[in-house]
Image (cartoon, rainbow, N blue to C red):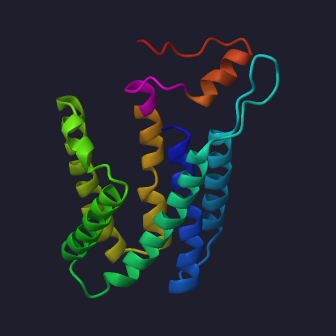
Amino acid sequence: VNKVTPIDKSSTVLTMILAVIFFNEAVTPLKILGAVAIGIGTYLMIEKKKTKGGSKAPPYGRWLIYAALSAVFASLTAILGKIGIQGVESNLGTAIRTAVVLIMAWLVVFMTKKQNGIHQIDRKSWLFIILSGFATGGSWLFYYRALQLGPASIVVPIDKLSIVLTVAFSYFILKESISIMATASRFGKKPFDKNR
């Protein structure tokens, strides 16, 4: 999670560029600085760790390609959404978008013949998938309203602050390691105790 999410959220830089191109939004030094900081931060978060022998870890798997594609589509989502909701009530726009996503997701399930797996989902997974759906719905409703009212080149970077929360949640809830902790241990500093 703490590697995939930074790549996905790097769509912020692409969205900022596209917002300038499509909507003639102002290019300010602060926006440029923000885009550069996001790019550097993304690079540092996905940096390959070295193995014990000093060599680099094996190359990233297919997840890297999927995360990069996710970033491109996330950027297009913001730009196309901004164009689409002009003159449309934001909640209605979100409902239409959600219906399209629902149909598309079920088409993929049936095309890959995975629909029978629904019976194998346990209660815990059902609970967290449903809670994730509520979180997604809330995020989309607020996001589209903000996008309708504000400039995409500012709304999108604020929305992408979710990366900080995602990395924190992945550490505390999923017990995933964070690169800065590995770096600290390399320099003889004791990283935070993951079990506290």
Find the magenta span and give its range.
Answer: 170-177
* x then y, percent, for residue 1: 48, 38
Q: What residue is drawn where x is 65% and y is 66%?
A: 32
Provide residue 114's location: percent of width, then percent of height: 31, 49
Q: Is 34 displayed left or right of 172 in the figure? A: right
Q: Quadrant of residue 80?
A: bottom left
**Which residue appears at 56% of the width and 46% of the height?**
63
- In percent of width and height, residue 149 lies at 33, 76
Residue 124, placed above or below residue 73 = above
Q: Nearer the viewer, residue 83 or 32?
A: 83
The image quadrant where one finds the C terminus is top left
Image quarter for residue 24?
Answer: bottom right
Point 74% across, 22% down: residue: 51
Task: Specify the principal SS of the magenta part.
Answer: loop
| Residue 56 image position (x, y, % from top left) | 78, 30
Whether residue 72 sits left or right of residue 80 in the image: it is right
Residue drawn at x 21%, y 31% is 122
> Which residue appears farthest toward the right when viewing the image?
54
Q: Is residue 63 magenta?
A: no
**175, above or below 139, in the image:** above
Image label count: 0
In the image, residue 144 above or below residue 50: below
Instruction: Say whether residue 111 is left or right of residue 13.
Output: left
